[in-house]
């Protein structure tokens, strides 16, 4: 490289530093794409990823950016020993790893006393949710702790299977696709110990509750309930184990996933709810709503000679009213009639057959969305700082973790999917712009002339 008339072998020096602590296996390919000889070639970029993946080296840097390849199998690279290996180590001193990124972010927060954020982006199935799990696990193990902080770390980790059960589903691209966006922040005190957290959810794909493309599934919790709950609970909810019995579960024609055990995941979710602090009554009410949505999907309508709509499945409405603790006749009327206000007077008129179906589905989507929001709020209560001092934003710093939903193009794209893809694209552009801006500021600090062109 040539700067101001002087030749400086910066690349050679950086490569020497980065390789000093590496094993022969770690040296496969290039561990930082900035050192790739033909760095403008897409083919060279992909080939470098392929060579490293063959040796189970799934992480590669692009400067301060970490690129991850999903190996779709378990790798022995996330042990506590590995955490200690990356603790307090310079970012480029040993081989790339998500623990290195986690530790570097934590130390930057402690040193600069500024909030930090880790953005996890990529296509559906790239491993974003798994990456967020690894980051949370790293902080829960390596940060200073006491009894309260250990409990907080456990709550953070246990919130993941709960949110996955209610917010993730099988799509054509991914067996465990996040169908909502999630921003989680971890609050640290002046000693660097985690003292609180908060989760913000947005853009839940609630249309999935009532419709799925062929080969897809509804949200995991429905299948986990039918497969994992004991007979007493199913009898209480008046449910059968066969998911094909429920209209909201048959449209995708995919009741089972070979890579997922709904029964085991059900046990994990029930344990997680207990750890987070849900009472037995709250869990029962939560499951009643899940069960009631399945019954609501089975509510059917008929159309009279005068065009009026009536319910043909009265037993479903009776069960639904019992689970929701509402009056059955009032519920039936709400599903078949609409209330209008005209000149200060209320007018009740019957719904058409199509309108009744739409009203049923709208109720199911609204119930699920509000339940999901309530679930997140309950988790946030368990994560909130218990000490009055720590509730003040001035006494703490944050590490934010944005686990954005994956980009997907499906055979039939819902409005939510369109919003997901649009948001993902805009976020990617912002990420590139901020990354290049950060690099430009570093060049200017070192007195190196550089010009950047960002194309969006």
Image (cartoon, grey):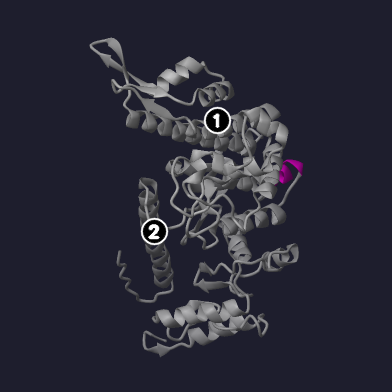
Tags 2 and 1 touching, CB below 8 Å? no
> Going by the picture, which residue comes out furthest to the left?
343
Give the image location of residue 61, x and y in percent: 53, 72
Query: Which one is in front, 403 or 193?
Result: 403
Query: Which one is in front, 376 or 88?
Result: 376
Read off the residue under disc 1: 292
Quadrant for the C terminus, please.
bottom left
Mark seen at residue 409? 2
Quick one: SS at disc 2? loop
Query: Which one is in front, 363 or 72?
Result: 363
Q: Residue at x 60, y 29 (%)?
A: 288
Residue 148 falls inside the magenta stretch:
yes
- Quarter of the image for residue 315 reads top right
Would you say 366 lies left or right of 383 here? Answer: left
Give the image location of residue 274, x and y in percent: 71, 37
Give the image location of residue 399, x and y in percent: 56, 51
Distance between the alpha carbons at the discs numbered 2 and 1: 31 Å
Q: Badge 1: few (under 14), some or many (20 or more) residues near its Cα, within 10 Å?
A: many
Label located before the other in sequence (2 or 1): 1
Quadrant for the N terminus, please.
bottom left
Mark seen at residue 407? none
Quick one: SS at disc 1? helix
Magenta span of residues: 147-154
- Quarter of the image for residue 342 reads top left
């Amino acid at each position: 490289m040539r700067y101001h008339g002087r030749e400086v072998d910066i690349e050679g020096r950086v490569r020497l530093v980065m390789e000093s602590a590496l094993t022969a296996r770690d040296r496969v390919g290039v561990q930082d794409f900035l050192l790739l000889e033909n760095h403008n070639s897409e083919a060279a970029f992909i080939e470098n990823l392929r060579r490293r993946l063959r040796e189970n080296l799934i992480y590669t840097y692009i400067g301060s950016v970490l690129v991850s390849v999903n190996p779709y199998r378990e790798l022995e690279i996330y042990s506590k020993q590995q955490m200690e290996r990356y603790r307090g180590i310079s970012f480029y001193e040993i081989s790339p790893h998500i623990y290195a990124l986690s530790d570097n972010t934590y130390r930057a927060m402690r040193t600069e006393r500024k909030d930090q954020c880790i953005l996890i982006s990529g296509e559906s199935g790239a491993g974003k949710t798994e990456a967020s799990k690894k980051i949370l696990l790293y902080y829960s193990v390596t940060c200073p702790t006491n009894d309260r902080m250990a409990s907080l770390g456990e709550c953070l980790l246990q919130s993941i299977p709960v949110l996955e059960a209610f917010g993730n589903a099988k799509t054509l691209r991914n067996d465990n696709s996040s169908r909502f966006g999630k921003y989680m922040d971890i609050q640290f005190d002046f000693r660097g110990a985690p003292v609180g957290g908060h989760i913000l959810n947005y853009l839940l794909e609630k249309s999935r509750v009532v419709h799925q493309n062929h080969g897809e599934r509804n949200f995991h919790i429905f299948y986990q309930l039918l497969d994992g709950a004991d007979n007493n609970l199913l009898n209480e909810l008046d449910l059968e184990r066969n998911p094909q019995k429920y209209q909201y579960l048959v449209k995708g024609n995919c009741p089972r996933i070979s890579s997922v055990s709904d029964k085991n995941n059900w046990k994990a979710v029930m344990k997680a709810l207990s750890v987070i602090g849900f009472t037995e009554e709250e869990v029962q009410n939560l499951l009643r709503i899940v069960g009631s949505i399945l019954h609501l999907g089975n509510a059917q309508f008929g159309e009279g000679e005068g065009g009026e709509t009536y319910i043909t499945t009265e037993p479903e409405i009776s069960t639904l009213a019992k689970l929701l603790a509402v009056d059955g006749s009032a519920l039936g009327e709400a599903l078949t009639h609409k209330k209008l206000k005209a000149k200060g007077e209320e007018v009740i008129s019957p719904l058409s057959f199509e309108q009744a179906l739409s009203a049923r589905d709208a109720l199911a989507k609204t119930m699920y969305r509000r339940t999901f929001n309530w679930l997140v709020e309950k988790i946030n209560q368990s994560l909130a700082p218990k000490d009055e001092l720590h509730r003040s934003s001035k006494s703490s710093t944050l590490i934010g973790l944005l686990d954005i939903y994956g980009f997907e193009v499906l055979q039939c794209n819902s409005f939510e999917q369109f919003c997901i893809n649009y948001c993902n694209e805009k976020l990617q552009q912002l990420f590139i712009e901020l990354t290049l801006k950060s690099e430009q500021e570093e060049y200017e600090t070192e007195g190196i002339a550089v010009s950047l062109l960002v194309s969006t």
